[in-house]
C-alpha cells in the first residue's frame, strides 16, 4: 500500500515554499494541506468490490493435512531497453490445496490494464503440450481446464508473452501516480508477470478490480526463480530487485526468492548504490546522482527501523531489503523492495521533520505488515496501513523522542481525521477520507489499544500477531485474537473506530 502521504502535484512548489516558511517555527503544521492532488480530485467509485470467479458447491472429503506446496514461477525475461519491451517465458506450477475441485485457474495480469500492455503468444499445459483455452479481462486471465483439478493435483502451465511498458506519466491531479513502466531514467517492473491469486474454499479465486486509490492485490506466498537479461541499453544498467542476485553477469541477473509475495525490479543507468549489512541482512539504497546526502539519511533510517521492528515485531525472514528512489511521486512497498518518492528527497530540509524520514520508516514496516504478514489489501487495508503508520510512531518514540509531539500533530492530528477504519478500499469517498480513516485513525486506534491493554500486553500481542501469521494472509480476527480479544469486545470497546457491521 501506498504510504498515505503526500503525492505532489503541481502545488509541489507552493508546498516547498510553505515548508521553507515553516522552518522558522519548527513545530508549526504545514501551511498547505499536503496531499494536494487527492484533496481536489473526485474519485468516483463505480467498481463492484469483488469478483468471485469460482464458487465451489460440493461437500469436501476430509483429507490428511496438506504439506504446503507453494505456487512456483520460473521466469525468463529479456528487457529491451530501447523498445521498452519485455519478452517473457514463464512456467507456473500450481498444486491445488483445496478440497474443492476447480475447473478453471485464474491468473493476475496487471500489465493488461495498459493499452497493448500484454500480448499472449503461447499458453499450454507443460506436461501434455496441449494448448489451454483462456479468457483475458482487464487485470485477470481465466484458464479453462478440460479435467477438474482436485485436491493435491498439480498443473504446470507455460506462458509466452510480450509486455509493452507504458511511459510513467507526469504527476496529474486526476489519476494516482503510476509505478509500473518507464521514465527517462528509470524502468519499474512491478506485478509484471502472471501470478496466482489466493484460492478461498468458499468464494473461489480472490480477485479484486483495480481501485482508484489504495491497493487491491492479494499475494499468497510463492517461490520465484527469475532469469533477467537487459539488451539494447546504451549504458550499463543497475538493477534493484526484491532479492539479491544469486548470479550476476554484466547484463544478466539470476534470482531465487522463495516464500515471497512478489518480485519487483527497478532499473536505471543512473542509480548510485549505498549498502550496509545489518545482522546478516543486506540493506541497499538505490538513488539518483546529486542525492548523496539524502542517500545516507534513507539508508540509516532503514537500518535503524529494520533493527527496531526486528526487536518489537519479530525476525524478518529476508536476506535483503532494497530501497529505491522513485522517479514518480509516491511511496510504494513490494516484498523485499520499496520505492520512495523523489519528492521526499527534494523536500528534505536536513531534519527528520519531514516525509523522507517518516515514509522511509513507514515503508520499512511494510516488510513486516504486508510482506511477512500479508492481508487482503482491498478488503482489510487497515491491517497493514494502520500498523505501518503506527510503526512510524514507534520509530520516533525510540530514536527521535523530541519529535514525538511533532509527529502526532503533523502526521495525524493536524488533519482532524474522521471515519471508521475497517471499510474496504472501495467504500471510502476519496483518497483523503481513506487516508484519514485507515492510516491516521488506524494509528489512533492502536494508540488507544496500547493504552487500554498496557505496554507489555500490547507489545506481546503485536509479536504474537506477527509470529502466528507470518507467511499467511491475515484477517482482522487474527489481529484481535493475538491480543486475546474477540471481535465483539473490540467493537464494543473501540466503537468509534469500527463500522457497525462485522
Ligand atoms: Zn503504507
Image (cartoon, grey):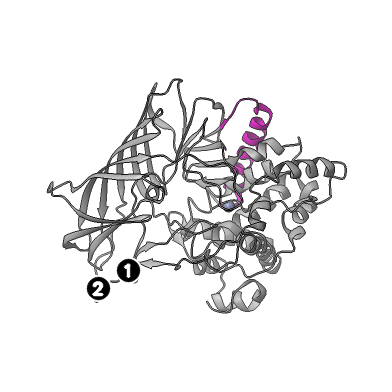
Q: Looking at the image, tell me whether mark 1 or mark 2 is earlier in sequence order.
A: 2
Q: Nearer the viewer, residue 317 or 351?
A: 351
Which residue is rendered at x = 13% and y = 46% of the image? 129
Task: Pinpoint residue 151: horizontal percent, then vertical percent.
Answer: 22, 63
Most prominent secondary structure in the magenta stretch?
helix
- Residue 276 lies, with reference to residue 378, above or below; the image says above
**Residue matched to label 2:** 60
Which residue is rendered at x = 56% and y = 37% of the image? 327
Task: Pinpoint residue 469: horizontal percent, then vertical percent.
Answer: 47, 59
Q: Is 486 one of the magenta-colored residues? A: no
Q: How many numbered marks does the figure carry?
A: 2
Task: Pinpoint residue 163: horizontal percent, then vertical percent.
Answer: 35, 40
- Residue 449 lies, with reference to residue 106, above or below; the image says below
Task: Pinpoint residue 263: horizontal percent, then vertical percent.
Answer: 41, 42
Quadrant in the picture for residue 80: top left
Q: Is 304 one of the magenta-colored residues? A: yes
**Residue matched to label 1:** 201
Badges 1 and 2: C-beta atoms under 8 Å apart? Answer: yes
Secondary structure under badge 1?
loop
Q: In whole angstroms, how far apart are the C-alphas of marks 1 and 2?
A: 10 Å
Amino acid at each position: 500500500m501506498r504510504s498515505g502521504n503526500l503525492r505532489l502535484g503541481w502545488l509541489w512548489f507552493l508546498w516547498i515554499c510553505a515548508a521553507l516558511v515553516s522552518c522558522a517555527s519548527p513545530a508549526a503544521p504545514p501551511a498547505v494541506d499536503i496531499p494536494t492532488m487527492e484533496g481536489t480530485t473526485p474519485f468516483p467509485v463505480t467498481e463492484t468490490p469483488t469478483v468471485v470467479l469460482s464458487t465451489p458447491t460440493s461437500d469436501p472429503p476430509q483429507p490428511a493435512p496438506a504439506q504446503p506446496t507453494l505456487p512456483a514461477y520460473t521466469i525468463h525475461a529479456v528487457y529491451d531497453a530501447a523498445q521498452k519491451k519485455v519478452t517473457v517465458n514463464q512456467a507456473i506450477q500450481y498444486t491445488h490445496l483445496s478440497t474443492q475441485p476447480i475447473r478453471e485457474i485464474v491468473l493476475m495480469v496487471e500489465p493488461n490494464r495498459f493499452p497493448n500492455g500484454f500480448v499472449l503468444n503461447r499458453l499450454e499445459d507443460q506436461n501434455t503440450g496441449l494448448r489451454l483455452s483462456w479468457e483475458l479481462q482487464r487485470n485477470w486471465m481465466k484458464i479453462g481446464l478440460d479435467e477438474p483439478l482436485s485436491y493435491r493435483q498439480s498443473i504446470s502451465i507455460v506462458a509466452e508473452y510480450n509486455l509493452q511498458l507504458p511511459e510513467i506519466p507526469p504527476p496529474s491531479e486526476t489519476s494516482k501516480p503510476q509505478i509500473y513502466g518507464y521514465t527517462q531514467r528509470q524502468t519499474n517492473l512491478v506485478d509484471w508477470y502472471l501470478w496466482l491469486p489466493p484460492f478461498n474454499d468458499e468464494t473461489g479465486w480472490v480477485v479484486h478490480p483495480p481501485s482508484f486509490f489504495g491497493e487491491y492485490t492479494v499475494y499468497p506466498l510463492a517461490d520465484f526463480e527469475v532469469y533477467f537479461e537487459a539488451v539494447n541499453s546504451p549504458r550499463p544498467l543497475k538493477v534493484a530487485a526484491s532479492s539479491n542476485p544469486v548470479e550476476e553477469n554484466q547484463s544478466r541477473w539470476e534470482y531465487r526468492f522463495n516464500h515471497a509475495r512478489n518480485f519487483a525490479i527497478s532499473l536505471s543507468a543512473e542509480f548510485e548504490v549505498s549498502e550496509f549489512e545489518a545482522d546478516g541482512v543486506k540493506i541497499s539504497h538505490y538513488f539518483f546522482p546529486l542525492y548523496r546526502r539524502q542517500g545516507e539519511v534513507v539508508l540509516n533510517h532503514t537500518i535503524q527501523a529494520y533493527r527496531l521492528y526486528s526487536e518489537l515485531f519479530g525476525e524478518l525472514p529476508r536476506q535483503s531489503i532494497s530501497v529505491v528512489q522513485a522517479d514518480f511521486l509516491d511511496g510504494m512497498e513490494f516484498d523485499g523492495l520499496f520505492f520512495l518518492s523523489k519528492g521526499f528527497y527534494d523536500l528534505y530540509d536536513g531534519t527528520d521533520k519531514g516525509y523522507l524520514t517518516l515514509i522511509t520508516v513507514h515503508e520499512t514496516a511494510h516488510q513486516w505488515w504486508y510482506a511477512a504478514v500479508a492481508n487482503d489489501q482491498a478488503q482489510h487495508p487497515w491491517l497493514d496501513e494502520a500498523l505501518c503508520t503506527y510503526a512510524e510512531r514507534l520509530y520516533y518514540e525510540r530514536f527521535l523522542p523530541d519529535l514525538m509531539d511533532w509527529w502526532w500533530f503533523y502526521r495525524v492530528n493536524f488533519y482532524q481525521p474522521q471515519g471508521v477504519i475497517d471499510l474496504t478500499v472501495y467504500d471510502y469517498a476519496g483518497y483523503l477520507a481513506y487516508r484519514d480513516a485507515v492510516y491516521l485513525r488506524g494509528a489512533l486506534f492502536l494508540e488507544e489499544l496500547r493504552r487500554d491493554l498496557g505496554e507489555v500486553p500490547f507489545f506481546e500481542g503485536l509479536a504474537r500477531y506477527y509470529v502466528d501469521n507470518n507467511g499467511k494472509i491475515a484477517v482482522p480476527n487474527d489481529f484481535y485474537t493475538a491480543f486475546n480479544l474477540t471481535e465483539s469486545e473490540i467493537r464494543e470497546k473501540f466503537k468509534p473506530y469500527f463500522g457497525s457491521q462485522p
